[in-house]
Each structure stands twice: as C-alpha cells, then as structure tokens.
Amino acid sequence: MNENPWKTRWTQEHIRAMLLEQFDTFWKKDTGIERSKIKEIEKAIPSPHAIVISGLRRVGKSTLLSQVAHKLGKDLFYYLNFEDDRFSGFQSEDFNDLYQLLVEIFGERTVFIMDEIQNINGWEHFVRRFIEKGFKFFITGSNASLLSKELGTRLTGRYIPIELFPFSFSEFLLFRSEMVPDFQRMTTIDWAHLNTNLSAYLISGGIPDALKYPELPLLRSLYDDVLYRDIASRYRLEAITALKELAYFLMSHPASLISFNKLKEQLRLGSVNTVSSYIEYMENSWLIFTLNLYSYSVKRQQIAPKKVFGIDTGLINSVGFHFSPNTGKLLENLVFLTLRQHTNDVYYYVTPAGFEVDFYLPSQRKIIQVSQRLANSQTREREFRAIEDATKEIPIESALILSDISEKEVQVAGIPVKVQSIPEWLVSF
C-alpha cells in the first residue's frame, strides 16, 4: 500500500497549526476597496450553489473572498488556501480527515471558503458531496480550463461562475480616492483631471498589488509566475523559450490581428498546433484573450485571423515591447476588457470594402469603434465609413464611437450613431 505523502509529511499538530494560521491571516487581511463583483456574489449567497470565482493570479480573488467573509461573520465559515506549500501532497481522499480537524478546531460550520482549489486533483468530488449535505462553498481558481472541466463534469447545475478582472476604471478611481464625476456639470479642469486619471490607468493597469506598491516589479513577477507555474509547469512544457517568445510577441501587440500560420513561421515554433496550444494555455491562465471574426460561416470564423488582447494594460506595458506610446491600441484593449466583463458575445468584423469594425455585439446588434481622437478628418471619415459599410451585410440597430470627446447623436445609413468620450463610457457602462 502506498503511503499518503501529505499525512507522512505533516503531523496533526502541524496541520492544526496551519489551519489556525491560515484562518487568522485571512481574517486579518486588508479587505481593500469594495469590488463591484461583491453585489453579484451577495445575490447568489442565499442559493444552494457553489460560487466559483476565477481570474488571473493577484487580481484580487482572495481579497474578494475576504470581503465576502466579513459580510458572513467570523464564526460562520472555514477557510483553506491550497496555494500554501504545506498542502503539497494533499490528495482528494484527505478531505474527510481535514474536515474532521476543522470541526475539532472551529466547531461545526456550514460554509467553506477555498482559495486556488485547482491545485487539488479531484476536489470537485468533495465539494459535490458536501453541497448535497447543505454546505455552501466559495471557491477561487486561476485556471479557467481546469475549473470548467471539473465543474462541467461534476458540478453541473450546482455552481455559479464569477469572473474577476483587474480593477475597472471606476474601481481605479475609488482606489485613488477620486470621485466619479457628474458628467452633467463638468468643467474644463474636471475633464483635464479625469483624462489624467485615465492616462494613469492606461499606463499602470488595474492589478491591485502593483498599484499599491508601484516601486516593486510586481507585474513582471506576476507575468513570470503565469508563464512558469501556471503554464510551463502545469502543462509540462519543455520548450520554455518558444513559450516565452510567443507570449512576449502577443503582449507587445495588443488589439492586433494574429495568424497562427504567420506566428509559426515568424517565431519558428514548429507547427500551427504548437502555436494554437500555447495560446490556449495563455487564455486558460487569464493572460490573454482572443477575439474571433464575426461571420455567418463557422469555418471562416475558425480560419480567419484572431484579435489578441491582454488581461491588463499595466501588464502589457511592463512586459511588452513598444517603440513609442501605443495609446490607441491600449484604449481598444481597455474597451475590450470592459465589454468582456459583461458578455462573451463579442467579435470583430471586416466590412465588404475592407474596413475593420473594432467590436460587434450580435445579441445587441451594435457595433463599437474606438478612436483616440476624431479631430482628424480622415480618421473621422474612416470610422463613419466603416459603420456605413457594415450596415450592408450584418444587422445593426445602433453604433457607438468611443473617442476623446462626446458629441450629439447622428444618423448613418439610418442607424443612430453615438459619439461618447472613453472615460465617460468606462464609468457608466
């Protein structure tokens, strides 16, 4: 019979001390600013379903759990952090013994708060069994693929997924103790101040710890952790150099079209399957997103170039390479992240005349263009021509151009087109 590596490594006294230490550290954790997702979670608390929060490392999942915990009360939950190296060797069959220890230490409780649960193979068996007993679970994880696979096979219909992104612009303003402005009473100075905040947000991004400790290279460390721990180690990759080169290229070209074939040739990555797999791993680890072309043909969607976006503009600025400030692409990346937090139903589109539409939301029949400035007549004409041309092939009921200023609504090919300033849209979306 094989020995259990966790039980042989740690005595009950060691485990007991770890559980007490984890709980105490978690309860004393700085809860930070209240995240907008807390309202979504509060609505789900009365349900019998597990609440599963996924997102990039260091994006604030544990802090969000801490906010939930303080709303529940100190005596109502158990806390477990499976990122702790003292859980090394822990197996799914150890959950029963662990639960017994938790009861001995904290008494009987019916709520579990679990951090980074994807580190434990078979965790979903324990969660499902205890859900059926009436227990409530709040769970976090940093790998979208592993979580979705396990949730889909074992917890179907028993969980509520919550995706946590870096700070939104509104949360960024809150973090900086800035008031969200009243756009009906904005002065020139108010606009200047708001645009200064947007520029700072575009540069630094929304990773909480990186904003809290700007003097430390935390974004670079985060990036390395994702590449080495969440991807290379988890997927047992040997070609680390190829992974790094691909990730570096993608992070250096936000809001750009990519072709798997061209990436294979340009970076000499061996095969299209290698490129496809590595990009999938990066998406699963929340480092990047890819956007499909909107087309009535599924085959065309699959073979057409994809648009790539980074999870955070601060991370893009820290690890990518740029000859000059890439403000226009970063703004488009920021708009995508805002849209993606509310819907998966987002595409880009190319009109019959070859104009690119930044975003198309088919469920809303709406297109969105992002332009750093509309003052240039050629830029302005291009944005409106793209909208007009798009109406010839896809159903559109409204259009939005996001730029530096707001203007009166106009009609283009019978479609209402709203021009709105990017900061105003970000805080009102």
Image: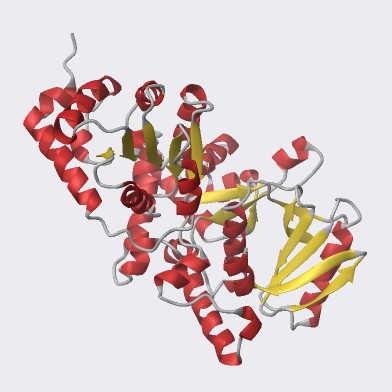
Q: Nearer the viewer, residue 262 or 311?
A: 311
Q: Nearer the viewer, residue 330 or 360?
A: 360
Q: Position of residue 88 (x, y in %)?
A: 22, 33
Q: Is residue 331 visible?
A: no
Q: Nearer the viewer, residue 19 or 287?
A: 19
Residue at the spot 62% in from the left edge and 71% down from the top edge? 328
Examine the image and state in which quarter residue 10 appears.
top left
Q: Position of residue 364 (x, y in %)?
A: 76, 52
Q: Residue furthest bottom?
A: 188
Q: Position of residue 90 (x, y in %)?
A: 23, 27
Query: Which color scheme did the rendering employ for the protein?
Result: secondary structure
From this view, report whether residue 373 is shown above or below residue 155. below
Residue at the spot 55% in from the left edge and 41% down from the top edge? 275
Taking 394 as reference, is 50 left or right? left
Examine the image and state in which quarter residue 28 appears.
bottom left
Q: Is residue 66 visible?
A: yes
Q: Residue furthest top?
A: 1
Taking 146 as reference, is 389 left or right? right
Residue at the spot 62% in from the left edge and 56% down from the top edge? 339
